[in-house]
Image (cartoon, rainbow, N blue to C red):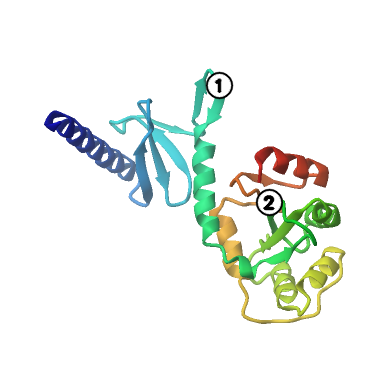
Amino acid sequence: MRWLVLVFTLVSITVIADEARIKQAITGINPMIQIESVSAIDQTPFFEVTLTTGERIYTDAAGSHFIAGDLYQVSAGGVKNLTDIGRRTDRQALLNGLDESKLVVFSPSGEVKHRLLVFTDIDCGYCRRLHSEIEQLLENGVEVRYAAFPRAGVGSESYTKYVSVYCAKDQNGAMTRAKQGETPDGATCDNPIADQYQLGQKLGITGTPTLIFESGEMQPGYAPWQDLLKRMNQLGS
C-alpha cells in the first residue's frame, strides 16, 4: 500500500506545483487579477481558473496558453457545457446565502410544486408582463419569489419604488399595483434592496427579468407562463 500512498503524494505535489505556476502566469499578466481557485479538469489536460469576478478561463499546466469562453465535453451521451455546470454551482452557493424572508413572495394556495426566483425591476416592461401572468403560475403550483434588481442602480427612482413596495404593509398588493404602473405610496424601513442588487451583479445579471430555477439554471428575459411551467417540469424544479 505504501507505493499507492507515494503515487497519490506525488500527484498532489504535481497538482499544487501546476496551480502555483498557473497563478504566477496569470497574475504576471496583470497583478490586479484576483484568482478564486484553480482546479484540474478530470480526464483533460486543462485547468479551470475561476476569478473573483465569477469569470472562468482555461489553461494548460504550464500556464502558457489560455482559453476564454465555454468549455464543452463531447461524449457518446451528447455535448455537455462544463463551464455552465460550474456557473450553476457558483450560483447555488451564492443563493444559499440569500435571506428568503426578505423576498417578496407570491405563494399558491395549494401545494408548492416549483419555486421560481425572479430578479425584477419595478419599471421594466417585460417584468410587468411576467407579473400579469402570475395567477396562472400560482394556479399551477409555482411559487414566485421576487428579488430586487433596479437596473438604474441604488438610489434611482426604480430603487426608491422597490423600497416602498418592500416596506408596504401589504407587499404583494403594493407589488401588483406597482407592476400595473401605479406609483407606490412612499415608505421606508430597514430593507435588503441594495444587497439584492449587489447579489444580482455577482450572479452576472445585467437585465430584467432574470429567472433562476431551483436547479441553479438562469434564464434572462421574459417567457410565457406556459413555457416556464414546461421548463420547470423538465428540470424537475
Residue at the spot 53% in from the left edge and 58% down from the top edge: 96
Spot occupied by residue 207 in the image (x, y as percentages of width and height): 68, 52
Q: Compared with residue 161, is residue 146 higher up or lower down, i.e. above or below?
A: above
Label 1 residue SS: loop
Mark 2 vs mark 1, foreground winner is 1
The disc at residue 77 is: 1
Residue sitting farthest toward the left? 2
Residue 116 is left or right of residue 51, and the answer is right
Residue 166 sits above or below residue 72 on the image: below
Residue position marked by numbered label 2 in the rendering? 210
Q: Which of 157 and 114 is in front in this view?
A: 114
Could you tell which of marks 2 and 1 lies nearer the N-terminus? 1
Q: Distance between the residues labelled 2 and 1?
A: 30 Å
Q: What element carries label 2?
A: strand
**Three-letter amino acid code at the position of disc 1:** Gly
Q: Which mark is drawn over residue 25?
A: none
